[in-house]
Amino acid sequence: MEIINPATEEVIINLPTDNEDSIIEKYNLLLEAQPTWDAVPLEERIQIIRGFADLLKKNIESLAAILTSEVGKPIQQSRNEINGACNRVIWLADHAQKYLSEEVMTQSKDLTEKIVYEPLGVICNISAWNFPYNVGVNVFVPALLAGNAVMYKPSEYSTLTGLEIEKYLKQAGVPADVFHVAVGTGEVGSILLDMPFDGYFFTGSYKTGQYIYERVAPKMVPCQLELGGKDPVYIADDVESIKSVAAGTADGAFYNNGQSCCAVERIYVHEKVYDAYVKEFVDEVKSWKTGLPTEEGVYLSVVSRKPQVEFIDEQVKEAVELGAKVLTGGKKKEGKGYGYEATVLVDVNHEMSIMKDESFGPVIGIMKVKDDEEALKLMQDTEYGLTAAVYSKTWERAKKILAEINSGTGYWNCCDRVSAPVPWSGRNHSGFGSTLSHMGIRAFTKPKAYQLRG
């Protein structure tokens, strides 16, 4: 399997991939090792996971360089991701004892009723390339804390990072056969779906998530899907600083070259502040430094996958044909690399793919609305349900809108953020189940009730 640098289109390395025999061998090793890992005291498992976070921090420069080389993420954003992942690891480690320990629900003279949280067993984590550290630690860290063994399949576009994760988990003290990496493309992923895992946890596109869900359904094991989004933002007419709101939402739309499942993907602006907002938004986008992702200070660089460039370009061309206007960008970058210009479109509508289908790239459509009711109707017009945001001076106004939207997360005066203390979950085509928070810790357990007399 060729690992290609998306900024230069050069082959970084050729890696041998797994096959059915090697996957079966790794699975059997995980199955044999899992009970011994579960028997390790929870406090010891917690300390091992803390050590993993320490190693990531200690080696952040080399890890960020690897991540940037294979994904094309600007180097500072690679550092940001690793630091953010470490913060999540620490939160999960800090709260594992509380949420994995047994709970006594009833205690009387003759009766004790309690809940014990047992590990699922051997779980399969099929992960994503856009934030491999963040979406990875959301799954394999609480899984390991809970006493599970993990088969981790990184995306073929972030495999080198996946192998670094494996290296540092084992350096931290995770036993050799408690965590294995499956290397390969979708063919290897398909093999994993045929194996008798005790749970499947996938991060990626709706189409692939649906396929995985259908394939593993007969097994009757947990299957969690963290999928994409077409996340809306509404800018009300009472916002206090158009300039700061425009800067914050532009960052929400274009950070990581727009390749985030919770990126701002469509923006609705009250007609009273529309012109001022659009001007400030475009000025912000034009102010960013672009270039090779290895250059310090670069904010926008390349997308990670070559086919995505064509998809984005088709969305933009279709929008223009249907009447949209390009205020900046609008075409592929010249030269080597999978580059597409930061693109802002106005005069858009919901007949256009740019406002309906996940773009996952550095493009955004901005639409004028006359009031909150129109904004709400348009925000609800989607098959996805990951996040939604409202910028308004008052929480009461924002809450009326957010309460009506079927999404896993609602933002008031912020966007495109994930926080460990609260659950990360989607609805409809954005998936189901939760990572992070106490729910994300217990997602990797099966509760057993004990009712004890005597």
Image (cartoon, grey):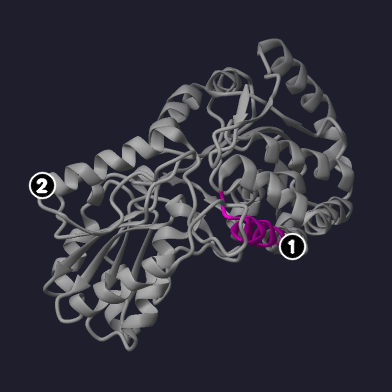
Residue segment shown in magenta = 73-86
Residue corresponding to mark 2: 322
Amino acid type at image mark 2: Leu
Against 405, residue 118 (above or below) is above
Q: Which is nearer the eye, 6 or 164?
A: 6
The answer to whether residue 224 is left or right of residue 2 is left
Secondary structure of the residue carrying tag 1 is: helix
- Residue at screen point 29% across, 41% down: 313
Image quadrant assignment for residue 153: top right
Residue 216: percent from left, percent from top:
51, 25
The answer to whether residue 290 is left or right of residue 327 is right
Residue 264: percent from left, percent from top:
37, 60
Image quadrant assignment for residue 309: top left
Residue 232: percent from left, percent from top:
30, 61
Q: Whole-Å distance between the Cαs marked 2 and 1?
A: 49 Å
Q: Which is nearer the eye, 399 or 311?
A: 311
Mark 1 nearby-residue class (10 Å; few <14, some 14–19, many ≥20):
many
Magenta span: chief secondary structure: helix
Against 20, residue 364 (above or below) is below
Which quadrant of the figure contains the N terminus? top right
Residue 386: percent from left, percent from top:
39, 54
Residue corresponding to mark 1: 90
